[in-house]
Amino acid sequence: MRPVRCALVLIALAALLIQPAAAQTFPQPGKPITIVGGFPNGSGTDIYSRRLADPLGRALGVSVIVDNRVGAGGNIAMDHVAKGEADGHTILFATSAMLAINPALYARMPIDTVRDLAPVIALAEVPNALTVAPEKRPQFTDCKAVIAAAKARPGALNYASTGNGTSTHLAGAQFAAAAGVEMVHVPYRGGPFAMQALLAGDVDIFLHQTPALVGPFRQGQVRLLGVTSRAPLKAFPGVPTMAEACGLPGFVSTT
């Protein structure tokens, strides 16, 4: 939690520093702060936002609300924040995909992410994990079994994502390219929807963000075949890196 505590201090300081000279004291008494996310309840950004809201509210002495405005890969949330009042009371919880990938992916953007948004602090670097539903895909006991199945039937396997251009989409595409296989991308409106599809057997694999996988992993709902970080993660004992498990040296994918 050390990085989060540091982030709280830096957010508070940055909010004070970026105010115009004539602005009111920040935060304004009785005026809540809203953290706006672009993905649904239960997604990685939602989990981090809610963990951030309580200590941030206590540090600043105001209420902090999480408001998820879902759609268009985070563009709806960005548009809402950029066109809102620039008083520091509306904070965007953005992902690297929202800020850097969306402008290259979407033909028309509602805002200019460089001109209309001011970065405050980087909160976390989040890896993904190659995830399967053991009840629906019992044959996928490890990463190499997935690769073998994909090579045996090019284009037959599919992978879920939390939307076009998101880290889960890019991680899946990166995995397919590194393994030399062809798989079909199936985008959903967020992590909970993609997870439902995985557990229902509608998709074969899902390279999901690790914060949202802690609960399903501990409950035995999912099997993790590898994490996309440089080293194994303590939250997932016994789960190797994808570089090791898949035989893909140097494979790393984070957001």
Image (cartoon, rainbow, N blue to C red):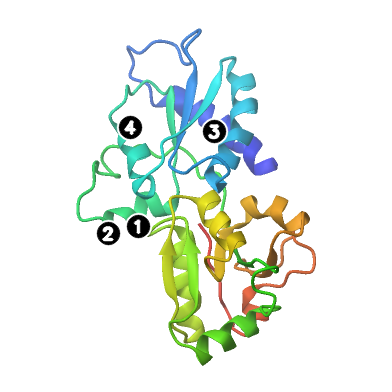
Label 1 with label 4: CB-CB less than 8 Å:
no
Label 2 with label 1: CB-CB less than 8 Å:
yes
- Residue toward you, 219 or 242: 219
Picture layout, residue 251 above or below residue 23: below
Closer to viewer: mark 3 or mark 1? 1
How far apart are the two marked residues, 4 and 3, measured between alpha carbons? Answer: 23 Å
Amino acid on which the number 4 mark rests in the picture:
His
Q: Is residue 94 at all visible to an observer of this figure?
A: yes
Picture layout, residue 191 above or below residue 253: above
Closer to viewer: mark 4 or mark 3? 4
Q: Position of residue 157 (x, y in %)?
A: 50, 78
How far apart are the two marked residues, 1 and 4, measured between alpha carbons? Answer: 18 Å
- Residue toward you, 157 or 91: 157
User: Which mark is drawn over residue 10?
Assistant: 3
Q: Residues within 10 Å of mark 4 (few under 14, many from 20)?
A: some
User: Which mark is drawn over residue 222?
Assistant: none
| Among the 4 quarters of the image, the one containing residue 250 | bottom right
Q: Which residue is mark 4?
A: 80
Picture layout, residue 89 above or below residue 71: above
Q: Earlier in the sequence, mark 1 or mark 4?
A: 4
Q: Is residue 235 at all visible to an observer of this figure?
A: no
Write the residue at 45% across / 87% down: 154
User: Which mark is drawn over residue 101?
Assistant: 1
